[in-house]
Amino acid sequence: MPVLVVQYRVADEGVAEVVEAIETAFAAVQAQQPDDIRYAYLHRTGSTEFVALVELAAGVENPLPGIAEARQLQATVAKWAVGAAPTPTPFEVLGSYRLFD
């Protein structure tokens, strides 16, 4: 199954707000514990670059749009994103050690 990657940069002044929205979204995801999803968010140290990774089990609908805090994260990213709007890109996993199984 593919991993969706969303990569983007935000304006300098938006980094703290995006980080806060990520933390809030992950707290909500942890509380709801949706099945059949693997989800990670990365921030490149010292930069305005972020990367989100999402893996869904085959045939499973993405639960993130059903979580209000995840929708708020998307809105915050859209507010601060520099350049084109971030869109998910599918990647094929060729090797993984305990990350994507």
Image (tube, rainbow, N blue to C red):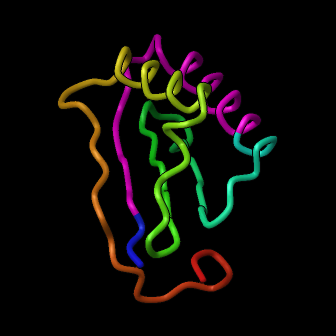
Residue 34 image point, x, y percent:
68, 54
Q: Quadrant of residue 29?
A: top right
Q: Which quarter of the image is occupied by the C terminus?
A: bottom right
Horizontal side of 30 relative to 57 (left or right) equals right
Q: Quadrant of residue 93?
A: bottom left
For the magenta stretch, what is the residue range? 4-28
Does residue 38 sit above or below 57 in this rendering? above
Residue at 32% from the left image edge and 71% from the top image edge: 91
Residue 77 image point, x, y percent:
42, 25
* Residue that lies at the very extreme toward the right in this rendered image: 31
Residue at 44% from the left image edge and 28% from the top image edge: 74
Residue 10 image point, x, y percent:
38, 25
Does residue 91 sit above or below 34 in this rendering? below
Most common secondary structure along the magenta stretch: helix
Front one among 18 and 67: 67
Residue 43 image point, x, y percent:
54, 42
Does residue 55 sit above or below 26 in this rendering? below
Q: Quadrant of residue 24?
A: top right
Residue at 51% from the left image edge and 44% from the top image edge: 44
